Structure formats: structure tokens, C-alpha cells
Image: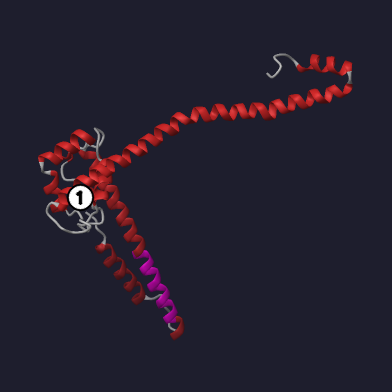
Amino acid sequence: AVTGADWSPFAEAIAATNPVWTWVWVGYISFTLFGVLNILTGVVVDLLRQPTMSAEAVRLATEQQETLAITKLFVSELLAHSKELEPMVSQKKFDHIVRKKRVHDKLKDDFGIDIGALGSVFHLIDMERTDRVSPQRVARRLLTLRGAARSQDVTRLYREVERLKLEVAMACDTIQDVHTMLRRDKATAAHSGVAMIGPRARLRVASELRAASARLPLR
């Protein structure tokens, strides 16, 4: 690949003049294969990666600009009715803002977010149900809901996934609480010399599990 022909004839011709040149020839071939060609391969690979990296950088920059623009839009609307230094968005304020034709049209035309088609989306923004969300978070969540693929079914699925995550987290906390209770009862039983595993202990564990299950936000 380096010489365009088999190396043997070249090596034999050089060895006929002086054996020392044979080692020079071997060194040249080794340097070219493991040095120059590796550098050229790296350059080609880097050139092929640059368009992908540039596209990703452009996407991230565009997303940051859109997030900033939507954040400014909500902050300006919030400050028009409130004098808070750090205005927060509640569901009432959110619904009031997005019902405005100017805001609705700007979200739809500039960012491809059709609030009317999505319906009520504040529950997807305020996952923690605090009714106090920063404008930056509102902007980031709204950008994830735009486009034709963000239909009502997709948003409903997204909500169900978040609900299941919350249930799993609460179930883990419940298991941890029951485990802590069992360890405490075991230590108490060991200290008093009374066997722990009995009808009363089993009834207590069952009662704790039923109470914890009732607290889970199941439908």
C-alpha cells in the first residue's frame, strides 16, 4: 500500500548494494505504516466527525436561545402583574398567560408549540405538584412538547411514566421503613429475650404495609 508493489523486489535490490540499506528500508516501511498512515487516518476521522459535532453544537445553541426567549416571554408577563424579584409560575398564572393571543401565537409561530392542540400541560411541567415552577423550567418543558410527534397521547404517556417513577420511589421508601422497623423490633426482642417472629409481629408488619400501600398515588 505504501510502495504500490510488493516489498520483496525492493528489499532484494537494496540488499544487493549494501546490507545496511536493508535495515534502512525496514525502518522506512515501519515509520510510514505506524507513523504517517496513523496520522493520516486520524485526520480523516476527525474531518468526518466535524460535521456531526458542528450539527450538535448548533442544535444545543439553538435550544439555549429558544429557552432564553421563552423564559423572557414568561418573565415579562409575570412582572406585568407581580413585583416579585423571582417570579414563579403557578397553574393559574400559566393558564392566564398562554390564553393570551399574543403569547399563544408567538409560541406556535416561533417555537412550534401549539398549546391549544396539547391541551392542559401544566401537570407535565409541575411534576412535583408544588404549583410553583421557575420560568426557566417552564421554557425547557414546553420545548420538549413541541412538534407533530408531541400529541396528546405522547404527553399522557409521559405523565404515566412520571407517575410510575414516583410510585416506585415511594415504594422503596416504604420498604426501607419496614426494614428499619423489623431491625428495631429484632434488636428489642434480642434485648428482652423474647422471640420476635410471632403473630403479633406479623400482624404489625402487615398493618404497616397496608398503610404504606394506601399512601401510594395509585389510580
Which quarter shows the C terminus?
A: bottom left
179 or 135: nearer the viewer:
135
Prevailing secondary structure class for the magenta stretch in the rendered image:
helix
Above or below residue 56? Residue 167 is: below
Answer with the quarter of the image where residue 5 lies: top right
204 or 23: nearer the viewer:
23
In the image, is 32 to the left or to the right of 188? right
Which residue shows up at 20% across the image and 50% down it? 75
Above or below residue 56? Residue 20 is: above
Say whether residue 44 is magenta. Answer: no
108 or 115: nearer the viewer:
108
> Residue 53 at x, y = what percent?
44, 34
> Residue 87 at x, y = what percent?
20, 56
> Residue 59 at x, y = what percent?
36, 35
> Residue 60 at x, y = what percent?
36, 39
Residue type at mark 1: give it: Val
Mark 1 burial class by Cα count in 10 Å: few <14, some 14-19, many 20+: some
Mark 1 highlights which residue? 75
Which residue shows up at 37% across the image and 34% down it? 58
Q: What element carries label 1?
A: helix
Answer with the quarter of the image where residue 204 lies: bottom left
**Magenta highlight range:** 174-189
Answer with the quarter of the image where residue 55 lies: top left
Colour scheme of this structure image? secondary structure
